[in-house]
Amino acid sequence: MITAELPQRLREEFERTAQSLYGRDSVTQALIEAVELWLARHREPPLEEERTANDRAYEALRAELEQRHSGKWIVMAHGKLQGVGDSLEEVDQLASTAHDRIVMRVGEKRSKEIEIGWQMTFA
């Protein structure tokens, strides 16, 4: 069991909002949701850090990639080159659980970044 004391103003606003959203067992439900969100936020490295690491890794390797792998497909994730292939199909599963990946054909201009959302897996 965890016991915590919130400042009165915060506690009152929290209870009022939880009651209006959840009704019965409102505080418990809202606390569970708050803890789950907090844990999710701290489990994985922030997306922006991962994106920056991938961009830096790509820039550091760009000349070498263009010289050795022009026309090939690459995947950059977790701040490093994950693989090179002749087709998109060869590399599309590399680092598939990464929050951010650079998937591109070497030598072609990088397209504008598009964020398509989180990947989901169903068991």
Image (spheres, rainbow, N blue to C red):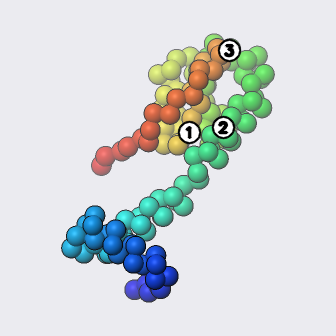
Q: Secondary structure at mark 2?
A: helix
- Could one spot residue 6 in this view of the protein? no
Decide which of 21, 108 is in the foreground and name it. 21
- Could one spot residue 47 in this view of the protein? yes
Q: Distance between the Cα atoms at labels 2 and 1?
A: 8 Å
Q: Residue furthest left?
A: 24
Residue at the spot 54% in from the left edge and 55% down from the top edge: 44
Q: Residues within 10 Å of mark 3 (few under 14, many from 20)?
A: some
- Residue 1 against residue 10 in the figure, above or below: below
Decide which of 86, 7 is in the foreground and name it. 7
Q: Secondary structure at mark 1?
A: loop
Q: Distance between the Cα atoms at labels 3 and 1?
A: 21 Å
Checking the image for residue 100, the label placed there is 1
For badge 3, the amino acid type reads Gly
For badge 2, the amino acid type reads Asn
Q: Earlier in the sequence, mark 2 or mark 3?
A: 2
For badge 1, the amino acid type reads Asp
Figure disc tally: 3
- Residue 96 against residue 106 in the figure, above or below: below
Q: Earlier in the sequence, mark 2 or mark 1?
A: 2
Residue at the spot 68% in from the left edge and 41% down from the top edge: 53
Quarter-wise, where is residue 62 in the image? top right
Residue 119 left/right relative to 49: left
Residue at the spot 39% in from the left edge and 78% down from the top edge: 12
Checking the image for residue 107, the label placed there is 3
Q: Disc 2, disc 3: CB below 8 Å? A: no
Q: Which residue is mark 2?
A: 54
Q: Position of residue 25 (x, y in %)?
A: 24, 75
Q: Position of residue 34 (x, y in %)?
A: 41, 66
Q: Distance between the Cα atoms at labels 2 and 3?
A: 17 Å
Decide which of 114, 61 is in the foreground and name it. 114
